[in-house]
Image (spheres, helix red, strand yellow):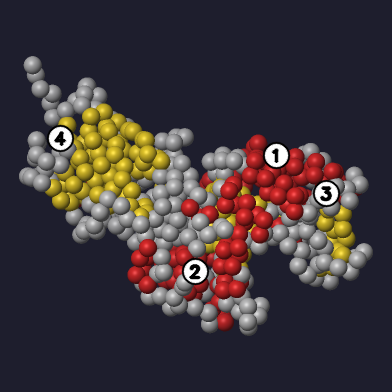
Amino acid sequence: MALRRGPSGRRDLPWAGNRPRTGGVQRRRPWVRSFAGLLVISLALGFVARGAPGAGRVTVEPRETEALLANPGMGWQTFQRFADEDQNLQGLPSASAYFRFYWRELEPADGRIDFGKFDALLAHAHRAGQKLAFRVMCTGSSQYLDVPAWLKDQGAKGVEFTYGGAKHWVPDFADPLFTRAHDRLIRELGAHYDGQPDLDLVDIGSVGLWGEWHMSGTEAVATGRPVPLPALELRLAIIDAWCNAFPRTSKVMLIGSAEGMARAVTTGYGWRADCLGDMGGFSKTWNHMENFYPQQLATTGAQAAWRTAPVAFETCWDMRKWQQEGWDLGHIFDYALACHASYVNNKSAPIPPGTRPAVERLLRHLGYRLVIRRVEHAPTARPGNPVDLTVVWENVGVAPPYRDYRVAARLTRADAPTDPPILQTSTHSIRGWLPGTHRTDLSLKLAKGIGPGRYVVSLGVVDPQDGQPAVRLAIAGAAPAGWYPVSALQVVAPTTE
């Protein structure tokens, strides 16, 4: 990962010049080009289209915007709170709320998982315009027990250890009592919530302090040695349990787990790193960003995991520490972008004065960002006939979308834009659209009974479950419901025999 410090603009980014392009699409000024005569001018809808009945094709080039967008599966995460209660967002959009739980918080009695807690959080996320991301942990708080007390009371084996001057207890992951209960917890959470539309991401935890797959700084009371991690086969079994329980949900593994990162290459989940911004806070000769993350990706073969699953970063300390140390925020954020990150989590800490432009610049490249570059179709159509619609897109972000949202087109009458659509169709999934250009060809079949007149052609990216727009586009002219009127079509009276 070769990174240049102190970038000033998009062309300076190390990944900007390597974005794949297809189809020979060239950027043009945001105007609408056509081949003959004037068909319609509709400034109120945010576009201009020219054409004439029977002539050529209408070509529309929407205007790209710099708006900050809150889109699912990416973005600036809130931490242990939601966007509607996080004052430190200061107006930044957020589509993901990240929470961590200790097992004792989720299953206070044997077999009685508190689904109500999860349901309430998912409902709150929905109200706040977000989706819920979470991790479950078995040790790491200031309390003695972070697994349910009933597990230890039933005779589960474990290790008492000291950390931070206090005593704690972590279960023996090889004990059948632990395995039975822990597997049940994962299985039941997956049965209830995998694929739930308000669930964003599962951060595979369970093992180690704070679910971070290490026991650094611990000392077992009985031996005086660091508490060992579970055996490799047990660690892999836990990873597989989470993956099997949540096959339809995006998943990430902490980068510190070498075996987990290696498994990501073949199992299709992404990775997470929790020390973005460490430029020497622990040592003057070693830091996470230069001396651990690149090497771990290379060693585990996970450099390309971002193509199929997300990369998430959490700030080391938070941005205030970066500013105090004089570290280059532009370089730090470009590092995340060079890793094709979809998420950055600043722990809902305040954004330091003077850093807002750098954050906004990050958010205009983080994850995916879809722009419609060109729309083409015939200027006129007749009832009962299809209308072929070609749309050229560009993902100007650094990662693909990982959810199966669909490109959709619809027709509404120009003189009654709030009426139900005359036609709506959706065929192409955006999942896996890598940075670069993409083309979708849609066919709109007009009913025989459609009346002549002028119709607005709108595009959107919708959730296939309800057909409603789910993704905001980086173009001008969005309608309140999330559709983007991009052109106009003249329906002419059918010919008479």
Side (left or right) of 490 relative to 351: left
N-term mark: 3 or 1: 3
Side (left or right) of 39 relative to 367: left
View extreme (top): residue:
497
Q: Residue at x 53, y 51 (%)?
A: 309
Structural crowding at the residue carrying mark 3, measured as other residues with C-alpha within 10 Å and reported as few (<14), some (14–19) or many (≥20): some
The residue to which callout 2 is attached is 1
Structural crowding at the residue carrying mark 1, measured as other residues with C-alpha within 10 Å and reported as few (<14), some (14–19) or many (≥20): some
Q: CA distance from mark 3 to mark 2?
A: 39 Å
The spot of residue 361 in percent (x, y) is 41, 67
- The circle drawn on residue 174 is 3
Residue type highlighted by circle 1:
Arg
The residue to which callout 1 is attached is 187
- The circle drawn on residue 26 is none
The residue to which callout 4 is attached is 380
Q: Residue at x 77, y 39 (%)?
A: 112
The quadrant holding residue 395 is bottom left
Side (left or right) of 358 relative to 234: left
Quick check: marks 4 and 3 in contact, CB under 8 Å? no
Q: CA distance from mark 3 to mark 1?
A: 18 Å
Mark 4 or 2: in front is 2
N-term mark: 3 or 2: 2
Q: CA distance from mark 1 to mark 2?
A: 38 Å
